[in-house]
Image: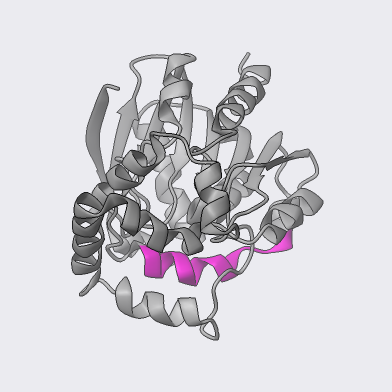
């Protein structure tokens, strides 16, 4: 896939972004945690079906300034300015995992800029809290002073011992046993995990994500007026399924699509083709 990388500077702050696909109806992607504008899960089928994908590195990720992530209101103002800079009036909005709060807030406060909202494995309310062991571990492993080494180790282990590393990571992604996951793996999955580990970085972004999840309210969800597709694996081990049910209850024009894929990374494993087909069908229904 051809990908163009750019930066937009406003008020001394930088937003890094990529554009994948030369032409077509624009999709704005709010990537998940530990990612950036080099994200690629699920992009191929969208580009092949005529969509153009704009992926911004969210606040604190990649080259995007951490200062714009002070709160969701401030950061979404900058994201709207990026669309103005790119001369894009309206987008399909795709919010993934920890990018859920940004997507929800943007859709609720900029309804004239959003054709549809798709939530994939998305955080839709307060997520990890200081009481959670995972939260405490994240404060250490993904602290800006440490995260580069964390991901260097993960990438190195994945390159040398790909199957072993994948096995160690699966509890973070799935509620299924490793045997059940193996039964649902595709040949490409471990390679995809290796590629993911090579491009992952946390920067200041993941700690910003943890602070922003508590900003999302039921009012934000209830004020979303665009058609919304909620896609979530039944076996997600990262973001509990209750987040999908909660969003479906609160958003007036929503459709819940529960998936049989093996976990949080819904673009991998048996059933992932259905994910791509279902999303393309939804987007095409509202692209005219």
Residue 153 coordinates in the image, percent (x, y): 21, 64
Left or right, residue 151 beside residue 85: left
In the rendered view, tell whether residue 254 sits above or below residue 59.
above
Left or right, residue 62 beside residue 107: left
Please name the residue shown 61% across and 28% down the image. 274
Nearest the eye: 45 or 274:
274
Nearest the eye: 149 or 125:
149
Please name the residue shown 76% across and 47% down the image. 251
Nearest the eye: 250 or 170:
170
In the rendered view, tell whether residue 79 sits above or below residue 246.
above
Magenta part of the chain: 206-218
Instruction: Inspect this view and state whether residue 141 appears.
Output: yes
The image's colour scheme reads one colour
Task: Give yes or no for residue 212 being in the magenta stretch.
Answer: yes
Residue 119 coordinates in the image, percent (x, y): 60, 44
- Where's the N terminus, which quadrant? top left
Task: Give yes or no for residue 156 being in the magenta stretch.
Answer: no
- Where's the C terminus, which quadrant? top right
Please name the residue shown 48% across and 29% down the image. 27
Residue 158 coordinates in the image, percent (x, y): 26, 53
What type of secondary structure mainly makes up the magenta span?
helix
Residue 186 coordinates in the image, percent (x, y): 46, 35
Left or right, residue 137 beside residue 65: right
Number of numbered discs = 0
Instruction: Inspect this view and state whether residue 96 appears.
Output: no
In the rendered view, tell whether residue 207 sits above or below residue 159.
below
Please name the residue shown 24% across and 28% down the image. 4
């Amino acid at each position: 896939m051809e990908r163009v990388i750019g930066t937009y500077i406003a008020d001394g702050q930088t937003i890094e972004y990529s554009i994948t696909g030369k032409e077509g109806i624009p999709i704005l992607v709010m990537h998940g945690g530990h990612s950036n504008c080099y994200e690629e899960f699920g992009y191929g089928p969208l580009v092949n079906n005529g969509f153009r994908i704009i992926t911004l590195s969210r606040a604190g990720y990649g080259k995007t300034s951490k200062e714009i992530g002070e709160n969701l209101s401030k950061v979404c103002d900058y994201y709207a300015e990026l669309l103005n800079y790119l001369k894009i009036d309206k987008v399909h909005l795709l919010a993934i995992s920890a990018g859920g709060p940004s997507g929800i807030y943007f859709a609720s406060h900029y309804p004239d800029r959003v054709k549809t909202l798709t939530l994939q494995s998305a955080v839709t309310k307060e997520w990890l809290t200081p009481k959670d062991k995972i939260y405490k571990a994240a404060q250490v492993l993904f602290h800006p002073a440490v995260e580069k080494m964390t991901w260097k180790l993960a990438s190195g282990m994945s390159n040398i011992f790909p199957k072993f590393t994948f096995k160690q990571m699966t509890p973070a992604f799935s509620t299924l046993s490793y045997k059940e996951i193996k039964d649902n793996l595709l040949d490409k999955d471990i390679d995809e995990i290796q590629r993911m580990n090579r491009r992952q970085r946390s920067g200041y972004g993941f700690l910003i994500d943890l602070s922003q999840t508590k900003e999302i309210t039921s009012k934000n969800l209830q004020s979303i007026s665009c058609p919304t597709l909620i896609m979530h694996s039944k076996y997600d081990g990262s973001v509990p399924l209750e987040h999908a049910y909660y969003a479906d209850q609160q958003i007036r024009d929503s459709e819940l699509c529960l998936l049989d894929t093996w976990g949080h990374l819904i673009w991998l494993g048996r059933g992932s083709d259905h994910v791509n087909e279902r999303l393309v069908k939804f987007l095409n229904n509202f692209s005219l």
